[in-house]
């Protein structure tokens, strides 16, 4: 279904783009960024073209319609981290994000600010929130935006005071009728908004959530720890100004360490649309996501929220801790969601850090990107979320290549990017697996998918490894594989493992090249497995089975760049796999 949608979209948009942008057609095929690179410097080598990055060293990529920015002085930044306070207000999507204007030194963190009408083209504005008051003089850290009834926008954020204590503060627009919301003020009345009491660890007390309403109160969560117990403190308020901590936190889990960037929101059990943060009712489940400081991964549980008891209880069978479900099994952290009232969807943004060296980051002049925003829904099983790149991303699709019914013979990769670059692409493939019964037995002691990917690293399986090799050189000196292995449990049900191995992603040796892995909860009743990879120079975001399991990579090929970057489908297992359909949109 995605494939046919993509197909018609590609043709339509290709024509549209050509007719809209006279004279751009040629650059579409000759890759102006490559010429630009040759003419000047290598700084842009790994810069992404359709991911959110700050404007620093922006390159002109007319293909993506995004070159007409004007940069306010002082708005340039090097290091981008957590997405903050995403929202839709008055015709614009707003994204704030943490940045350090002084490079890689931690301190003076401010809220940079960009706006967009379509989640694709972004206009950078001046920083919205920066240290200026005693309650935030040493930093303005992460937080969230809430749009209260009557279109009243408020940002809650963590401020660091002169004694390095973490406090929760609020800011409001100076002029709410400015759709850009350029200027923010921190009213004297009610700031600081929440100071840590005796129970709270003032060195680990941060990242207030979007507020939600229940039982006549407004509520926010703040992430924290008590020794090794991860904690989401709950605060309630009648007037949105005075906040009182509940006697017991909304949720806490021993052994998980510090909780950062909590996110708490409802998902619809039966519906296909996202829900506003205050929705409650019979058709609603709740999601609690936290960013585990100790592992640097975002994990979540699905459960029930009891507003009258100020309690959240994860459903039976939901692992609540290190081995819990992850929004992404790769490089993804500090995510934050918001409800988009225009398209009735919940969208989650996550930050992806660099895996190269700090010296490389200095040379590049930038570090850190926001991954493609994703819609979030509850899977029909009720046991996990599914995420999918926002549909607006498909407007970037131009030239396309279509392949169908290709037998993938063992050890004979099939090149999908024939005659075009695979350095920036949206690849959608469906594999069909004829002989599921040949799958190897699954050992129930294999609990950790990442470990299992390692364990099987050099092992030829029956069904798999098969999948894609992206950002790959013609002779495979460099490649990033995203692939599956299929096992068979005792009850004959398939166990699907998704892996990505960065070992050969670059010839550079000083780069962090992890192996990532996640299980994909599918029954393969139709013997088909789909994979979509968004490739953008130094980032690969791969969505298995319609967004049930996701792995994001940051990789830095040295040869597999620009038109030397290819996409292959491969099968290294002994059993045959068919590449049923493949579509490359560039
Ligand atoms: C980039 O685009 C701007 C206008 O958006 C133009 O002024 C500038 O010359 C372009 N630079 C290159 C290298 O094409
Ligand atoms: C308080 O937080 C700091 C910073 O994370 C940590 O070093 C310290 O151990 C914490 N203390 C307690 C009692 O949790
Ligand atoms: C940040 O950018 C400035 C200006 O390009 C540069 O001088 C500085 O070295 C960069 N710092 C880092 C850590 O990248
Ligand atoms: C597939 O097999 C070939 C040949 O043994 C090997 O070079 C390559 O690394 C394998 N690819 C993956 C992703 O396992
Ligand atoms: C990103 O960088 C790698 C390599 O330096 C670290 O191992 C990760 O922990 C880090 N991730 C985050 C979220 O900070």
Image: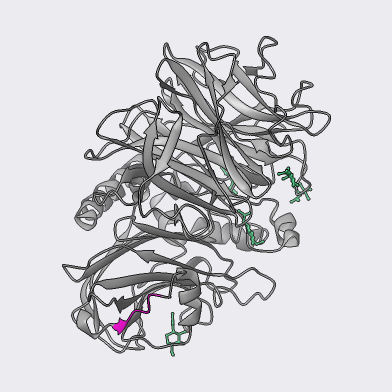
Q: Residue at x 59, y 71 (%)?
A: 513
**Quadrant of the image for the C terminus?**
bottom left
Image position of 266 with respect to 33: above or below: above
Tell me: residue 152, above or below residue 65.
above
Q: Within the image, what quadrant is residue 297 found in?
A: bottom right
- Is residue 582 in view from this perspective? no
Coloration of the structure image: one colour
Image spot of residue 250 (x, y percent): 50, 34
The kind of secondary structure the magenta stretch mainly shows is loop
Which image quarter: residue 439?
bottom left
Q: Pick out the residue farthest to the left.
A: 526
Q: Residue at x 34, y 55 (%)?
A: 547
Q: Which residue is painted at 21% across and 79% down in the image?
A: 436
Residue 545: say if magenta.
Answer: no
Question: Where ligand 4 lies, by quadrant?
Answer: bottom left
Q: Farthest right residue?
A: 163
Rendered location of residue 260, percent (x, y): 60, 43
Frontmost residue, 364 versus 515: 515
Q: Is residue 286 above or below residue 405?
A: above
Question: Which region shows up in magenta?
Answer: 440-444
The picture places residue 404, in percent across and down from the top left corner, at 20, 71
Q: Nearer the viewer, residue 541 or 246?
A: 246
Residue at 46% in and 38% down: 121
Is residue 310 visible to us here?
yes
Of residues 283 and 45, the one nearer the viewer is 283
**Which image quadrant: the N terminus?**
bottom left
Total number of numbered discs in the rendering: 0
- Residue 302 appears at what percent x and percent y? 38, 45
Instruction: State left or right for residue 236 relative to residue 280.
Output: right
Nearer the observer, 93 or 448 = 448
């Amino acid at each position: 279904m995605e494939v046919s949608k993509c197909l018609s979209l590609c043709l339509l948009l290709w024509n549209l783009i050509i007719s809209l942008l006279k004279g751009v057609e040629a650059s579409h095929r000759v890759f102006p960024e490559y010429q630009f690179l040759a003419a000047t410097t290598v700084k842009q080598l790994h810069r992404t073209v359709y991911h959110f990055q700050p404007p620093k060293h922006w390159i002109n990529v007319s293909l993506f319609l995004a070159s007409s920015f004007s940069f306010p002085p002082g708005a340039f930044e090097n290091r981008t981290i957590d997405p903050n306070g995403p929202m839709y207000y008055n015709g614009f999507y707003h994204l704030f994000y943490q940045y350090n204007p002084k490079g890689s030194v931690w301190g003076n963190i401010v809220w940079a600010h960009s706006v967009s009408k379509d989640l694709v083209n972004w206009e950078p504005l001046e920083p919205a929130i920066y240290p200026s008051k005693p309650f935030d003089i040493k930093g303005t850290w992460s937080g969230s935006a809430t749009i209260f009834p009557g279109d009243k926008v408020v940002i809650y954020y963590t401020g660091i005071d002169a004694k390095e204590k973490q406090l929760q503060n609020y800011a409001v627009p100076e002029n709410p009728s400015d759709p850009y919301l350029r200027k923010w003020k921190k009213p004297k009345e009610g700031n600081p908004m929440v100071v840590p009491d005796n129970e709270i660890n003032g060195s680990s007390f941060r990242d207030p959530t979007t507020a939600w309403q229940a039982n006549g109160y407004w509520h926010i969560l703040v992430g924290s720890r008590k020794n090794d117990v991860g904690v989401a403190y709950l605060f309630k308020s009648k007037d949105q100004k005075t906040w009182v901590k509940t006697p017991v936190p909304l949720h806490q889990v021993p052994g998980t360490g510090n909780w950062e960037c909590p996110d708490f929101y409802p998902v619809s059990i039966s519906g296909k649309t996202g829900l506003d943060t205050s929705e409650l009712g019979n058709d609603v489940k709740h999601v609690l996501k936290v960013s585990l400081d100790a592992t640097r991964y975002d994990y979540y549980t699905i459960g029930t929220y009891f507003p009258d008891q100020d309690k959240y209880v994860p459903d039976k069978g939901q692992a609540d801790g290190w081995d819990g479900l992850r929004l992404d099994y790769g490089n993804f952290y500090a995510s934050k969601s918001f409800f988009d009232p225009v398209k009735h969807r919940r969208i989650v943004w996550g930050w992806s850090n660099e895996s190269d060296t700090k010296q490389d980051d200095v040379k590049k002049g930038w570090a850190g990107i926001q991954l493609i925003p994703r819609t979030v829904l509850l899977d029909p099983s009720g046991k996990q979320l599914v995420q999918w790149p926002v549909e607006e991303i498909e407007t970037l699709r131009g030239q396309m290549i279509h392949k169908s019914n290709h037998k993938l013979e063992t050890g004979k990769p099939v090149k999908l990017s024939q005659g075009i670059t695979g350095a920036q692409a949206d690849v959608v493939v469906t594999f069909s697996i004829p002989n599921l019964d040949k799958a190897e037995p699954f050992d129930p002691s294999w609990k950790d998918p990442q470990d299992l990917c390692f364990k099987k690293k050099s092992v030829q399986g029956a069904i798999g490894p098969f999948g894609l090799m992206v950002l790959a050189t013609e002779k495979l000196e460099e490649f990033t594989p995203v692939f599956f292995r299929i096992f068979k449990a005792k009850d004959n049900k398939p166990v699907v493992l998704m892996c990505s191995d960065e070992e050969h992603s670059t010839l550079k040796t000083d780069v962090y090249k992890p192996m990532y892995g996640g299980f994909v909860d599918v029954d393969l009743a139709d013997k088909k497995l789909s994979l979509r990879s968004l490739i953008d120079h130094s980032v690969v975001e791969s969505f298995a089975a319609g967004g049930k399991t996701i792995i994001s990579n940051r990789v830095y090929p040295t040869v597999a760049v620009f038109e030397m970057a290819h996409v292959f489908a491969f099968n290294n297992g002994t059993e045959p796999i068919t590449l049923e359909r493949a579509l490359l949109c560039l």
